[in-house]
């Protein structure tokens, strides 16, 4: 796991142009992981873009970026930078997709799976 995080951090730094090696965004491999939570690659983002998913919201649905446990904290910046590059801009028009909370509040107990095959009261 530490190796994967290190590779991701290195790719992210390269994407942002912070490495002194001279390697830039255009030199990144298509297999570069953009979203470590869902293993979404630069190729996945570009392919989805070419398929017509040209907004952060539709890219989110097509590739699952922003939908992992980090909720875009790891992939948000680099995904925004990729979108900007694909738009031919320095900054994306919209950085993040919308947040969609539940329609109404839900109690945590209602979300827990309950095995209905067992009798009530915990007796086996």
Image (cartoon, rainbow, N blue to C red):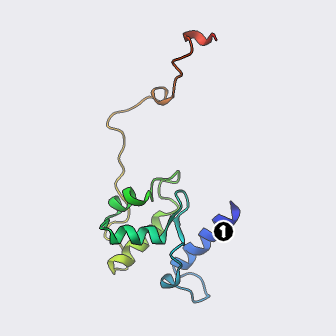
Q: In the image as oriented, which residue stretches furthest toward the right?
A: 2
Q: In the image as oriented, which residue stretches furthest toward the bottom?
A: 22
Looking at the picture, tell me which residue is in the foreground, 13 or 28: 28
Q: Is residue 81 above or below residue 111?
A: below
Crowd class of label 1 (few under 14; some 14 to 19; many from 20; radius 10 Å): few
Residue drawn at the location 55% of the way across and 72% of the way down: 12
How many numbered circles are shown? Answer: 1
Q: Quadrant of residue 95?
A: bottom left
Residue drawn at the location 36% of the way across and 39% of the way down: 102
* SS category of the residue bearing label 1: helix
Q: Position of residue 118 (x, y in %)?
A: 57, 15
Q: Quadrant of residue 31?
A: bottom right
Residue drawn at the location 40% of the way across and 72% of the way down: 46
**Where's the N terminus, which quadrant?**
bottom right
Q: Position of residue 5 (x, y in %)?
A: 64, 64
**Where's the C terminus, which quadrant?**
top right
In this image, 73 relative to 97: left or right? right
Q: Which residue is mark 1?
A: 6
Q: Is residue 112 above or below residue 38?
A: above
Residue drawn at the location 56% of the way across and 79% of the way down: 14
Q: Quadrant of residue 119?
A: top right
Q: Position of residue 13 (x, y in %)?
A: 57, 76
Q: Position of residue 106 (x, y in %)?
A: 40, 31
């Amino acid at each position: 796991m530490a190796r994967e995080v290190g590779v991701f951090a290195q790719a992210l730094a390269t994407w942002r142009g912070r490495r002194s090696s001279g390697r830039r965004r255009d030199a990144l491999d298509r297999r570069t992981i953009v979203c470590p939570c869902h293993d979404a690659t630069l190729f996945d983002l570009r392919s989805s873009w070419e398929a017509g998913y040209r907004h952060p919201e539709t890219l989110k649905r097509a590739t699952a970026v922003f939908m992992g446990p980090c909720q875009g904290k790891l992939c948000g910046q680099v995904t925004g930078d990729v979108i900007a590059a694909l738009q031919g801009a320095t900054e994306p028009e919209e950085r993040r997709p919308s947040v969609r909370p539940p329609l109404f509040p839900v109690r945590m107990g209602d979300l827990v799976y309950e095995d209905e095959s067992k009798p009530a009261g915990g007796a086996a």
